[in-house]
Image: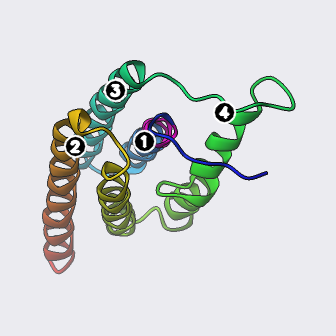
Amino acid sequence: MEIFLQASDILQFAVRIEEDGEIFYRKAALTAGDESARMFFNDLADQEIGHKKTFQNMLTKTGEHMPPESFQGEYIAYLRDYIDNKAVFTKDAASQQLSDTGDISSAVSFAMQRELDSILYYQEARQFLSVRHHGAIDSIIEEERKHFTNLAEMLIRIDSNKGK
């Protein structure tokens, strides 16, 4: 099945990326050993919710693209499977990362890579969206960069505390 992406597809991908990011950060908060790490991950999860709302708002202004389906819900199921299993915060990789190590620095490193992947996705996706959405995309890219920076600072603190 050949699929041509439209702006609404890109935005639906973005919504799902943010949902998966929130899930990952909530799970990381549950596995974190101390209160400050739990608060840190929960704050990142809350920010992902805000990003999701921004993309949903953009999606309502763009209008959904629904190609012909063999069965009802096929297209959305395809998009969710693609994002959940082949893109940024893949559920299997996230679950594996958290359950295998239980190590907060591994979770932070994993999250840093996912934030970079999100930034790259949004930078590429921006090209396919109307100019009227560029400001919103740019602000989300900037927030994802802040997430990366915050995660990097957290990793430095974790690593410096290991030697103590």
| Residue nearest the observer in this picture, 99 or 153 | 153
Query: Which label was assigned to residue 14?
Result: 1
Q: Which residues are magenta?
A: 9-16
Classified by dominant secondary structure, the portion drawn in magenta counts as helix
> Magenta span has 10?
yes
- Which comes sooner in the sequence, label 3 or label 4? 3
Tell me the CA gap for discs 3 and 4: 17 Å
- Choose top left, top right, bottom left or bottom right for residue 133: top left
**Residue on which disc 3 sits:** 58
Q: What SS does tag 1 mark?
A: helix
Seen at 15% across and 71% down, the residue is 156
Packing grade of label 2 (10 A; few <14, some 14-19, many >=20) is many
| Residue nearest the observer in this picture, 28 or 17 | 17
Q: Estimate the x, y position of residue 151 in percent, counting from the top left.
A: 21, 60
Q: What SS does tag 2 mark?
A: helix
CB under 8 Å between discs 1 and 2: yes
- Look at label 2 and name its amino acid: Ile
Query: Which label was assigned to residue 3?
Result: none
> Magenta span has 88?
no
Q: Estimate the x, y position of residue 4 in percent, counting from the top left.
A: 61, 48
In the image, taking residue 107 as reference, residue 5 lies left or right, namely: right
Packing grade of label 3 (10 A; few <14, some 14-19, many >=20) is some
Query: Which label was assigned to residue 76?
Result: 4
CB under 8 Å between discs 4 and 1: no
CB under 8 Å between discs 2 and 4: no
Seen at 31% across and 64% down, the residue is 116
Tell me the CA gap for discs 3 and 2: 12 Å
